[in-house]
Amino acid sequence: MIRGIVAVVILDLKRFWVDRVRLVVGLAQPLLYLFVLGAGIGASSRMGGGDYRRFIFPGTMGLSLLFSATFAAITIVFDRQIGFFKAVLVAPIPRPAIALGKIIAGAIQSIVQGMVLLPFAPLAGASLGPLQTVEMIGAMALAALTFSTMGVAIACRFNSTTVFPVASNAVLMPMFFLSGGLYPLKVAPHWMQVAAHFDPVAYAVDLMRGVVLGEFFFPVALSLGALALTMVLLVSASVRVFNRGEDDSSLGASRLGWRR
Amino acid sequence: MPNPPARTPDASPAAVDVRGLVKHYGSVEALRGVDVRVEQGEMFALLGPNGAGKTTLFSILATLRTPTSGSALVLGRDVVAERDAIRREMGIVFQEPAIEQRLSGRDNLFLMGLLYGLTIAGARKRASEVLEQLGISDLADRRAQQLSGGQRRKLELARALVADPRILFLDEATLGLDVDARRTFWGQVRSLADAGRTVFFTTHYMEEADVADRIALIDFGVIVALGTPRELKARLGGGIVSLTTDDNLRARAWLSEHGFEPEPGGQEIMLLHADPAAVLPELLRNLPVRVERAEVHVPSLADVFLKLTGRGLEGGSKP
């Protein structure tokens, strides 16, 4: 089991390393939010430009982690199309090991992307002390793991590389916008505050923001609990899809078309 | 065989033992009752047109699909109930590429080794061994996508061999390769079989099936014929040996005396025989005349298929 997970993780990280230029390209989006959107909205907000940038830094970090983790999960869909996954599927490793390996590998890729963004914190006015940095990395790791679980849970149900990005965007963008990443939840309309309670991204962003600003919207224990619950539910959902017995070659996506 | 032996897991079970295998996809009957037994060490071909059920049978044996009914044992173990145990014993080459194109061949094999439970050092060593064995060490450090079609297929074969499997399954493994590359590929597989590994492969190229020890012809989800390539060809009523000798009259007399029935008349002696290629050496050794020219016409597997099903191999099973 452990060996199987390690094998899947090494496999994905090797492939990630081939595409390492993605780390640089992946910086573009959060920096755009931080310094362009952030400057524009910040100038027109009551907080003022500097404070607003500092405020949305954890939000853009969340965005970066969210998209890199989900993008890592796309390899599941991609492999299924080129047949590579079949070779993994007929290997004598338990199915849960594949699901867990994918989740861990996605989280690592996501956290590496986050670490590339982290040095920009001082530029956004969010300088972190040594203890804060450690706390921040801890919160990032938790967020990355949750987001990777979400990515895998979505990806394992698709077998088309064209459908998956559309579908995942349809889920991820609302989650990000509701998370309070770009505005304070406490001044948001009541229904958005209620909705945010069902949004794992909101808890993850709130933890990171708490580290930077020192004030939390959700109690810390609630955030930790919500993220843990999300992970437990989604991991077991993914494992169930990976475990589906009939017609393993399609890995649970069989409803979207079969092949002889 | 009137009394087939009871199915107990013995010391050396059949490599593949399939009985009454049925597979439906919704209303489509891909397999309609298949019985096949492949002995260990055999090289066995499953030959049939596209859509005949080859890939379905292959996928069931490869533990990728489950049968609707009937049973399939690989090395004495059930492909459904004992899936994990036989996965260790199998090496599989798929129709579609199953190597990561952006990684090097060596990395691909190394990762496969890890998936089959080798340690990191063990997987590295095994990757080098297999590359060496197939003679592709010099290509090993290039990205797979930079290799030619034939080289990539060799890499697929190498991938299947990483776990040192007792049985190799290949599904249309040379699809899209030119004749030369196909010949090299099958030469390599043949030597693996000669070294004692069981090989089970599907193909719709009859010249590929010819390298097998035995062939099963499959059509519309049932096995329509099974035997060695020679036996199958002999089903057509055999082939023809034609001989030109320095004394045709004497040759004809000798042939008649020894139970052959040469066709009357003609410049050459025409001889119908069930297995002309096997009988020719005997004739050449024993004829009391000098043979100036000898020719053998053997029907192809395509002819056999045509005779058995009324259709060619290339056409596909769907009417």
Image: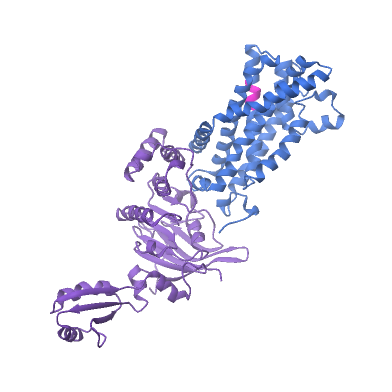
Write down which chain is painted blue.
Answer: A
Q: Residue at x 37, y 63 (%)?
A: B207
Check the image and report above or below for B33 versus B55. below
Quarter of the image for residue B301 reads: bottom left
The magenta segment is A137-142
Q: Main secondary structure of the magenta part?
A: helix
Residue B25 placement, left or right of A44: left
Q: Quadrant of the C terminus of chain B?
A: bottom right
Task: In the displayed orientation, state which residue is furthest to the right.
Answer: A190
Q: Residue at x 51, y 45 (%)?
A: A84
Write down which chain is painted purple.
Answer: B
A227 or B213, which is in the foreground?
B213
Residue B64 placement, left or right of A43: left
Tally of numbered discs: 0
Task: In the displayed orientation, state which residue is furthest to the bottom.
Answer: B264
Q: Let me know if residue B231 is in the magenta part.
A: no
The image's colour scheme reads: by chain
Quarter of the image for residue B142 reads: top left
Check the image and report above or below for B20 versus B265. above
Residue B216 placement, left or right of A190: left
Q: Quadrant of the N terminus of chain B?
A: bottom left
Task: In the displayed orientation, state which residue is furthest to the front.
Answer: B267
Q: Position of residue A159 (x, y in %)?
A: 62, 48
B81 or B47, which is in the foreground?
B47
Check the image and report above or below for B216 versus A140. below
Q: Position of residue B14 (x, y in %)?
A: 38, 60
Q: Residue at x 75, y 24 (%)?
A: A37
Looking at the image, can residue A248 be seen? no
Looking at the image, can residue B156 be seen? yes
Q: Position of residue B199 (x, y in %)?
A: 38, 56
Q: Position of residue B183 (x, y in %)?
A: 35, 56
